[in-house]
Image (cartoon, helix red, strand yellow):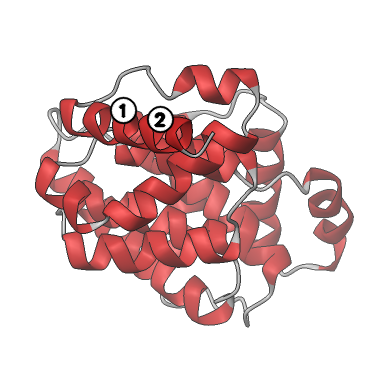
Amino acid sequence: MLALRLTSIVLFAAVAGYALQLSLLDSKYRYVVNVATHLELGETVSADVNATAAEIVFKSSFEAGCRSDILRPALTVVLFHLDRTNQAVDYEKWASAHGAAENFLSSMIRCMPSDGNVWLREAVVSRAIAEDPTSLKQKMAMSNKLMPYEAPQVFARLAIWKRISPFALAACEGQARSDIRTALVYGSRELKASLKMNMSAAFAALLKREINNLAALG
């Protein structure tokens, strides 16, 4: 859940574009886009309203025709909905929501394979269900390849590297080292400071090696 909260800062920000599209959309799309717009603006949206919008997205009849102006706000709705589900309180509801979100993201990737943010969200959601190092490596590598230097994306990937198991981090070491180097060399003061916050022992060891490697290069 924390990973989803951390990555929420890099949700798509085309709020003005959403509003302009509302009058042109089918009612079900209009409802989803409207809810997403309020979420993006930081306005209060009740859990019931957000859940209703998410249910619309998850229905098989929700066919956006690969339109980014619909899929992106739909993803905003989906991620906020997931953030409001609680594994400890209602595991079946949590698992169902995550499975539906994973299916939606898989479809979104087919529509928007060059969007690194979608690959990153898919990695976050699928890991919440089960940590598969091979799958995680593939998705994070795509995110890194498509958006290697965008600070919000780097921050979000680092949040994942800090929390995955030592085995998974070892499997993804190349991608993790790339993000660490990017943060150390090009990152803002805030991004560099965040490297040492809430990190696992395995990540701390990898970070130390990268710092030493950069120091050796002068």
Please give the count of numbered marks on the rendered protein.
Answer: 2
Q: Is residue 84 left or right of residue 184?
A: left
- Nearest the eye: 78 or 179: 179
The structure residue drawn at horizontal position 54% and vertical position 35%, both measured from the top left corner, is 183
At label 1, which amino acid type do we have? Lys
Image point 68% across, 36% down: which residue? 40
Position in image of residue 202 (x %, y %): 18, 33
> Which quarter of the rendering shows the C terminus?
top right
Please, is residue 101 above or below residue 37 in the view? Answer: below
The residue that mark 2 highlights is 211
Alpha-carbon span between mark 1 and mark 2: 5 Å
- Of 168 and 123, nearer the camera is 168
The residue under label 1 is 208
Mark 2: which secondary structure? helix
**What residue lies at 65% left-to-right and 46% top-to-bottom?**
150
Q: Amino acid at mark 2?
A: Ile
Camera sees residue 84: no
- Measured as percent of width and height from the top left, residue 147 is found at 60, 57
Q: Residues within 10 Å of mark 1 (few under 14, many from 20)?
A: few
Front in this rendered view, residue 212 or 21: 212
Q: What is the secondary structure assignment of the residue under circle 1?
A: helix
